[in-house]
Amino acid sequence: MTPTSHAPSRAETKIPYMKLKFLISAAAGVLLLLSACEDTSGIGGSLAEPNVAINVDSSFVITGQSFHQPAFDTRSETMLLGAVDMEGVGSYSSSIVTQLMSATSLSMPDTVPVDSVSGMALKLNFRRGALTGDSLAPCQLKVYELTRQLPSGIQSSFDPTGYYDPAHPLGVRNYTASILGLSAADYPSGFTTLKVELPLEMGRKFITQYRTDPSVFQWPADFNRYFPGLYIENTFGKGCMVNVTVAEMSVYYKVKKRVSVMVNDTLKYVDGVGRDSVTIFSTAPEVLSSNNLRMNIARPIRDMVERDNKVVVMSPCGYLASVRIPAQEIVDKYYATDFDLAVVNNLVLTIPARSITNDYGLRPAPNLLLVRRCDMTSFFANNEIPDASKKSFYGSYNTATGKYTFSSMRQYIVDLLAEGKTVKEEDMDFVLIPVDIASETNTMTGAVYVTNCLPYIYRPTLCELDLSRASLCFTFGTKH
């Protein structure tokens, strides 16, 4: 409660106490509460008791603006590789730095000699259509071994210079991301693979190490000291960016096999030589993987923000939106209402969004995180999930209505009311960030639980938020 020049009397403190009491624990059946703001006509007349009222207020004004966020935490299972120049939108490029998870045991038989190892390759797997740009655009990539440990606080602005030897790539591959001419067997489960041949000596060295001292492969920290990881960069082409799901390093070896052949119309089995493989390292959630993203925003988009004061959200490494949630006005209207008992029903925020015309299929992000600006960095660094009790929420984009809806903000306003009549500025200063939400559904109850929340980098996104038509609907019931 805001300090005053005199001590409050018991009469002055009685009503706030009752308000707080029924915010935290409301008596069941006292109030009939509404959860929507579209139809408020006749609400009072529909109540059985004349001294019970439903208060619905959506008159609050949401304000905000775009700001550029060129660097952020991009530690993710998603790896973007390539470059794309989108006229009127901007140019993106992304390279990859990643540690690898080692297999704890070698499935290659001990009876196979090391000199039977015939090759090694890096396989970059991506889903069909998981790209931005033209799948037929010619590209080139190079793979390097890291020479130093990656820093723990890595961000998208990370400069890999000094972490690899540019004069000695492990492998080079010219490619397109097209699957034209491939059969379903070439990309099982909708995946296709970019295969980069690596030095034969490297494969034999790893197999020898496995057989002489396997302890270095038992724990990620030990293995990463032995092999810090890979740097993968796009060295040619600006027409395609591929979303790599997983990277695997595999060793190929020759083995003796009994094969069937036809001799004079007779089927016979003879000794032959076959080729087998074993994946010994791969990317995994347990180890560090990060995208080195660069974004140059085109003048038309910059003019929308800088000249026309439009609220643009563009990711990754583009524009985020700061918004002010007028919580002080909500608290003031609540306390200005005459009542004996009260319970907060809900607080729902909806924000209209529209696609900005472009030739590259860029659309609004599927989800936006609403988090206090002061918590923006720690939220991702600590692998948090949206939690109303910590003043963070997420809203999903509805393509039918063209709106983001944040429907579970009740606890936010309940907590603010419990803290007193004055709302701290940091509790009204929020940021909207495109995020990727992973969730699980309880098959018994149908309840959905968010299990992961990361910056959305699956593909570039672009939209304009119309805060002038945003709605913040506060509903609470009172009994006089």
Image (cartoon, rainbow, N blue to C red):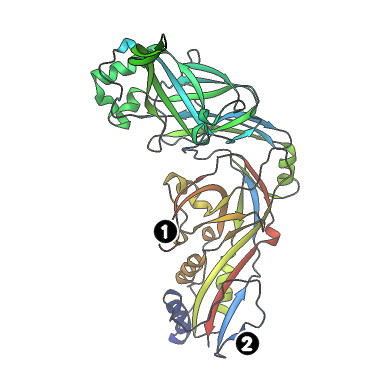
Left or right of residue 476: residue 451: left
Report if the CB atoms under discs 2 and 1 are less than 8 Å apart: no
In terms of sequence position, does the residue under pointer 2 or pointer 1 come before the other? 2
- Identify which residue is drawn at 75% across, 46% down: 307
Identify the disc placed on residue 297: none
Q: Secondary structure at mark 2?
A: helix
Q: Is residue 157 visible?
A: no
Q: Residue furthest bottom?
A: 50
Task: Report the amino acid beneath label 1.
Answer: Asn
Q: Is residue 196 above or below residue 469?
A: above
Per the image, the residue denoted by label 2 is: 45
Location of residue 148 (image quadrant): top left
Closest to the observer: 29 or 338?
Answer: 29
- Image coordinates of residue 377 in percent, x first then y, are 48, 46
Residue sitting at x 39%, y 34%: 287
Q: Nearer the viewer, residue 43 or 67?
A: 43
Q: Position of residue 288 (x, y in %)?
A: 41, 34
Is residue 445 shown above or below 68? below
Amino acid residing under circle 2: Gly
Give the Cα distance between marks 2 and 1: 39 Å
Q: Is residue 72 left or right of residue 152?
A: right
Label 2 neighbour load within 10 Å: few <14, some 14-19, many 20+: few
- Mark in the foreground, 2 or 1: 1
Q: Nearer the viewer, residue 124 or 230?
A: 124
Residue 193 visible within the image: yes
Q: Position of residue 91 (x, y in %)?
A: 66, 32
Q: Which residue is mark 1?
A: 442
Q: Position of residue 456 (x, y in %)?
A: 54, 43
Q: Residues within 10 Å of mark 1 (few under 14, many from 20)?
A: few
Residue 297 lies in quadrant: top right
Residue that protrudes farthest toward the front in the picture: 265
- For the residue labelled by badge 1, is the local secondary structure a helix, a strand or a loop? loop
